[in-house]
Image (spheres, rainbow, N blue to C red):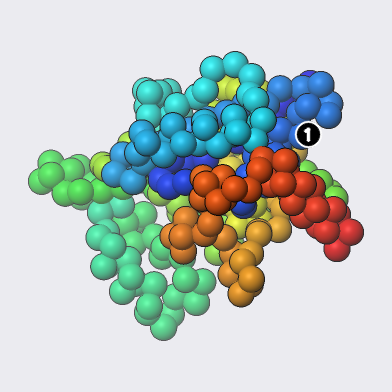
Amino acid sequence: MEVTTRFAPSPTGYLHLGHAYSAWAAWSRARENGGRFRLRLEDIDGERCKAAFASAILEDLQWLGLDWDGEIRVQSLHMADYRKSLQALDAQGLLYPCFCSRSEITRALSAPHNLERVYPGTCRGLSAAKRAARMAEGKNFAWRLDSGRALQEVSDFGFYEEDIGWIDGDLVGLGDVVLARRDLPASYHLCVVHDDALQNVSHVARGRDLFEATHIHVLLQRLLSLPSPIYAHHSLLTDSDGRRLSKRDHAASLRGLRQAGVSATEVLARLREIRLRQETA
């Protein structure tokens, strides 16, 4: 099997050291095994994603010397592909429209009886007539995966995690995830599953914060008859105060480090040190 990895950032800000580690880990795996390294821009959020950040991502990767193979997959250019995947799930009877507003969902989640703190399926039991009537009224809605029905279609599912082994799929704490809504025709979950298969990704290296989402991803892969990659979820990088690096908290960007005189060689050396620490932890 040819090793194919990928780096799939969202252009919502400048890359920081945590992004660089994920990209370098994936790139290194591909290059050390004579494989391919794919680049994907997950820009489906039209409000937050900016062309300037997309350009900056390419500049930062080129500065680090992380070259990629083939064309860059830009998700916003392929919404029709994701709609086909959504339609395939709908044809299996695995989707339902959810008309709940964010405030209604928040109130439902705060109710004493909702111990799992996941969407309680308020709209799951609506009759076909009520669903049609609300759609005819122009009510805003999102398409949710009926996880109960999905689990009936799949006898067992799970994924292979490097350094751990096989992990059984478990949707506890995840519930009926949103796969599309009016302002976002396809969710991250649906797009990433489609594109990993399209780009023949065999190994996924990404942050530990996406470990739980992997359970949804491998379930969708089974439902859509798509292959499952091997996964490796690395620990998240933190700042001096122990907080995870994030764009929201304005973590030092690669661009900022470059402007401060830090060389790409120094950054790569730090990434190798991080990997060594994680391997020996």
Q: Nearer the viewer, residue 135 or 161?
A: 161
Residue 249 location in percent, x, y? 46, 64
Judged left or right of residue 10, residue 122 is: left
Tally of numbered tags: 1
Q: Residue at x 66, y 59 (%)?
A: 237
Is any atom of residue 207 visible in this view? yes
Judged left or right of residue 215, residue 41 is: left
Residue 3 location in percent, x, y? 77, 26
61 shown above or below 144: above
Q: Quadrant of residue 106?
A: bottom left
Q: Residue at x 43, y 47 (%)?
A: 13
Instruction: Say which quadrant the N terminus sits in.
Output: top right
Q: Secondary structure at mark 1?
A: helix
Q: Residues within 10 Å of mark 1 (few under 14, many from 20)?
A: many
Q: Quickly name the residue at label 1.
A: 29
Q: Identify the residue at the far front of this view.
A: 261
Instruction: Say which quadrant the C terminus sits in.
Output: bottom right
Q: Nearer the viewer, residue 226 or 223?
A: 226
33 shown above or below 133: above
Q: Residue at x 38, y 29 (%)?
A: 76
Q: Identify the residue at the far right of this view.
A: 280
Amino acid type, label 1: Arg
Q: Identify the residue at the far top of this view.
A: 70
Is any atom of residue 206 visible in this view? no
Q: Quadrant of residue 55?
A: top left
Judged left or right of residue 10, residue 230 is: right
Q: Residue at x 64, y 19 (%)?
A: 69
